[in-house]
Amino acid sequence: MNAHRIWILGATGRTGRAIAARLAAGQMPPVLVGRDPARLRELAGRLGEGVRTVVAGSVDAVVTRIGRQAPTVVVNTIGPFTETAAPIARAGPPGTHYVDLANELTAVTGLLGLRDEAVAAGRCLVTGAGFGVLATESVVRKLCEDRPPAMRVRVDAVPLAEPGAGPFGPALAASIVDSIALGGRRYEHGRLVRARLGADAERLALPDGSTVHTVAVASGELEAARRAGGAPFVVAASSMLPAGRAIRAVLPMAAVLLSCPVLGRAAKRRLAGVRMPPGERGGEFSWARARVQDADGSTRMGWLRTGRAGEFTAAVAVEVATRLARGEGRPGVHTPGFLFGPELAVKAGGRFLLAGDGETA
């Protein structure tokens, strides 16, 4: 395998740097792709011998370079994924595979809609290769292994940022703003329907003894959970949105305002530069929970415990990209848990806590 065939788009960003460092440490020096030649050279120098750079100042330029040089795997960390995922995933000749970190509902479902095109081109496209999507998806798949389709599924994502993680950055900021702008969504009777943004609030008691509030959001985790459990009723929630009653009351109005393209773009730019808050809890773990109800009314629940969300995301992206570079994917469009199973989360450093494992689930 040619180690230079894994490209990282947005390589000088926080997540791009983490992915590049893991690949270089694993003796798979990547190709760093970005807009700033000086920053690319500086990062390549720190990562060591064999790391190359490609300067591309726009998505169109990235698409052109992929078409000319035909990398084996492209890892896309450039947000907003609602704008970058489809054109980059379609770039390159047959056999160029694609990985992104999307968790926006429209970005994930949009890419999944390219299945026939990807099969015809012999490409394997993987969306949601990070804490967002894989963490909750893997718990649902673990709970539903070798069982009939569930009746109801609820997933809750509780990511923990790195200490001093710095600003949100463009990709995460775009994901948050786009999720708010889309408004609430859930699956009812197998159909995606509107819901009040900030509904389905719960206070979770985490396995480490801390507590956290979550509210329903329109995220890629919603679609992944539906596919993983086969349930007609699905809710996806997160601790990333404010959960206080007063704030939840104004979230629908925020959705209306942010759905305006001009205001939405301004909000993304502003949020991208805001430093991440420490959150309402301490600790050292991120958590993902799934609660599954079967047709007979019985309920099962499980957790995935990971380290910091950013570290887990980088580990997932590297594991998926490496497997695709080795030819272990298959043509089509997949979420990571669907393609490689729930144990992918364990390989990336997660641990399942399920009923019967000797720990509270």
Image (tube, helix red, strand yellow):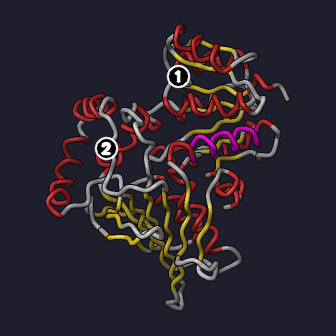
Residue at mark 1: 12
Q: Are marks 1 and 2 in contact (CB under 8 Å)?
A: no
Q: Quadrant of residue 29?
A: top right
SS category of the residue bearing label 1: loop
Highlighted range, magenta: 312-324
In this view, 345 is above or below 31? below
Res. 277 mark: 2
Q: Residue 313 or 160: which is nearer the viewer?
A: 160
Please give the name of the residue rendered at 45% of the width and 42% of the height, measured from the top-left corner. 162
Camera-nearest label, 1 or 2: 2
Q: Is residue 119 left or right of residue 297?
A: right
Q: Please name the amino acid that badge 1 sits on.
A: Thr
Please give the name of the residue rendered at 60% of the width and 77% of the height, measured from the top-left corner. 149
Residue 203 position within the rendered picture, expressed as x and y whole percent measured from the top left: 32, 70
Residue 189 position within the rendered picture, expressed as x and y whole percent measured from the top left: 44, 74
SS category of the residue bearing label 2: loop
Image quarter hosting the N terminus = top right
Q: Main secondary structure of the magenta part?
A: helix
Magenta stretch: includes residue 316: yes
Please give the name of the residue rendered at 59% of the width and 19% of the height, measured from the top-left corner. 33
In this view, 206 is above or below 110? below
